[in-house]
Image: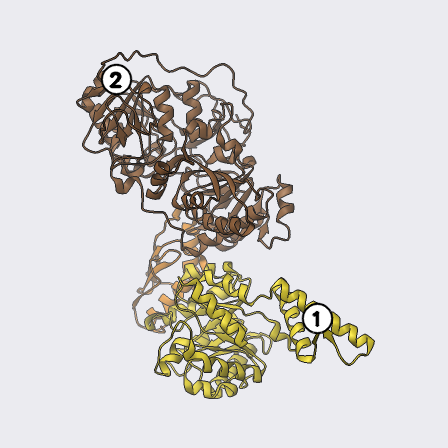
Amino acid sequence: MINAAGREIPEIIKGITKVTPYAGPFAICPQGRMVGPKIRAGKPGSEKLLKSLEQAIDASGLRDGMTISFHHHFRNGDYVLNQVVEAIARKGIRGLTLAPSSLNDVNDAIIPHIEAGVITAIETSGGRGKLGRLMTLGKLSKPTIIRSHGGRARAIECGDLHIDVAFLGAPCCDRYGNMNGVEGRSACGSLGYAMVDAAYADTVVAITDNLVPHPVHPISIPQTQVDFVVVVDSIGDPAGIASGALRISRNPRELLMAEYATGVIEHSEYFRQGISLQLGSGGASLSAAKFIQEKMLARGITGSFGVGGITNPFVEMLEQGLFETMFDTQDFDLPSIQSLRNNPRHVEMSASYYANPHSAGPIVNNLDVVILSATEVDVDFNVNVITDSNGIIMGASGGHSDTAAGAKLAIVVAPLLRGRLPMVLDRVDTIVTPGETVDVIITERGIAVNPRRTDLIESLKGSRLPVLHIQDLQRMAVELAGKPEPLPAGDEVVALIEYRDGSIIDVVRKPK
Amino acid sequence: MSEGRREAQAGTLESADILITVALTEPGAGLQIDLVSPTMKQYGAMIRQVIEKVLTANGIADAMVHANDKGALDYTIEARMQTAIDRAVGKG
Amino acid sequence: MKMEQLKLRRAMMFMPGNNPAMLQNAGIYGADTVIFDVEDAVAVSEKDAARQLVHNAIKRLQYPCEVAVRINHIQTPFGLDDLKVILPAKPDLIRLPKAETGQDIKIIDEIIGEAEAKYGFAAGSIGMMAAIETAKGLMHAYEIATASPRMVALAIGGEDFVADLKTSRSREGWELFVARSQLLLAARAAGIQAIDSVFANANDDEGFLAETRLIKELGFDGKSVINPRQVRMAQEVFTPSEKEIKNAERVLAAYKEALERKSGVVALDGKMIDTPIVTRAERVLAYAAAVRK
């Protein structure tokens, strides 16, 4: 069947109970109730602290065929996922579904355990490196399910994704399981993605290298949700977890795109007292922070809140009083972690509060403006951040479709050419964010406004910004690079791109 | 064309460039093009065509070309080919 | 006023001539002129490759601005070959470095003229400019500026010039003060533009802005830049402010009214308006119109 994004979705997909085609960003009206966490009875004097990962795996009751989860707050410095999967493999448990909030290059280390059948399915935000390639080659027992951050929170809370055991790295933890992410050598800042797992998994195991006396303060994930605590030598490499202060790019092309993005915001109706804003951590998006800061100062306005993915430029704006509050699901650099620890206006939030569309309203609903990056875009304003030009999975969905759907002005930034390849296409390889939720596309050679946004087109008149039709941008790219040969379409479905509401917006097929 | 059967190189391995080696071979040996490119599937055939076009325009029917592409556009491929040929025939 | 003087050259941006990534993106930064450099930016062993690449870029890519090529000096082994390869692509301007005599200009003028005839370009369609980088060149600046009707601008090459003076560059630029003024005089006497030297420290925005304001006050028409980020900054300095435009409009209105009244004396806000003030106001408005285009 063809879904509302124009993509052919097979009606029956191996290993998937029910395939609901995407019907529009807000088409699904969910019924019923959210699932409840398992009831446990932690008695006074009970001991949660176990001696080893092996002991914790035994205590958790993990068996063949179950689903395990992890958070990705340690990014490329993560030691937890690899260590735990290693320990599970040693126990001879097989046929698990791996459902982390995302995967990083460092997790390529688990590939032997996938090949050996310890892990046979993956549900996550995306894939990179060798793991991405493995997913694309269809080496799992069923297609990988790719969800946005909000979509994952929704899936967990409504029961689509049932987690049997969550193994959560805890930078600071006490023996009764209270934890936070802002203290300790492996501090990562917000534990926003782990919060949903902690609240809904049948069994929660905290893994820490920094056991502190009870009670931890502040508490991000409470003892009421944590069954066991294990101390290991190290849960992560600080250098891979967070960088030093992220700085504004000096790449002139990225700066130019950041200036264009800022120009669009400045000329929109949303650039007023109380603006709310999310910026990605990509080069151009991050650089826009500096220009937006200048414009806000010049115009004499302050914002209501910022959302992130927090980075140093955002922290500076919070400290300058340019924003009242920062909502934080994850931190990319050390100043952001410090700010979350020290600044009461810097608020930790869960992935559900951030973006779950099937709640009474996530914070993305209140966003005025978001600036996002893209791998590819097309003339219908659809965005791909998952597959590369050869159809290989190499990126993650993240909060892309969530923020685009929520924000009043969703700006997507992409270079017109990457190497020789045009990035404005007839049709993106894989749709992650549907064009009807994308308002503006920015390249270094021009800006295209979604024709649905006649109001924006009007406000940008007289702005001196290079506003063109999206087809003009595409033509420019082809004039420079020539028209690329289309790749032969694959047939075997190897991954599903789930829209945030649980419908299927696209599938990834194994390239020929 | 001169008698010299020389080999010459032009270009770099920087992004958007292409490193090309042209070796003039015995008459009758024909054209042999050895191309490495990150966009082989999308542009491989076009890049070969450009290389052949420049060789033909220079009256060269027998050569071995090795091209290591880093995403070069046609104007660059043509320029690097021309420079490599000029250098190979001693015009460089 | 000659039309040529209305051509804006507030920011003339150098791009290394042997770098495809930079050449193909040269047009996106809004520079008034891009200058493809096959001189200092290119190693001696790569001169042939760079001139071929620049030729192809000009011929095949579309630039939304004026395109100039800085060739090697014709007394070097490269300059004549540069012209031979690059002229058929029809650049808008040839920029000669280290100009010292009017004769240098005349030789190039003749070669350009032959190329225009050979390739069927309109006679005089390829312009020239020259950079003064030595004391000797400065002594001949007027002769250089007037050696060919193709000449549209004189530029000062600061680094080489101060080396020739046996001093070095300071942040304030006192060592260049006389040279800049003298170059400006020569350019103005010849009725062409004067373009200032590059500001070397790409990370010192304050210093760049200060120097650009200074040379604008001296009378320069623009600045050579090496970093795309400096384009916008230079242009902002050179673009008349709303206040300047308003004021110029008022001056012209008062002048026009006085003419209609056949009154000999024109005054605005208690100040007398004479011809130079009217000329300046006209220049501000012509400039503002050119910027808007």
**Quadrant housing the N terminus of chain C:** bottom right
Q: The yellow chain is which one?
A: C
Q: Which chain carries label 2?
A: A
The one nearer the camera, A210 or C67, is A210
Sort mark 2 into few (<14), some (14-19) or many (20+) by Cα contacts within 10 Å: some
| Residue type of the residue flagged with mark 2 | Ser
Residue with the mark numbered 2: A60
Instruction: State the image coordinates of residue A434 (x, y, percent, origin top left).
Output: 52, 34
Chain under disc 1: C
Q: Which of C163 and A507 is in front in this view?
A: C163
Which element is circle 2 on? Answer: helix
Q: Which chain is brown?
A: A
Q: Is residue A363 left or right of residue C272?
A: left
Quadrant housing the C terminus of chain C: bottom right
Q: Is residue A493 in view from this perspective?
A: no
Q: In this picture, is C279 found above or below A208? A: below
Residue occupying image coordinates x 46% and y 82%: C178
Q: Is residue C102 something one can see in this rendering?
A: yes
Q: Can you identify the residue that label 1 sits on?
A: C269
Q: The orange chain is which one?
A: B
Query: Residue B5 placed where, x, y %?
Result: 30, 68
Q: Which colour scheme is used?
A: by chain
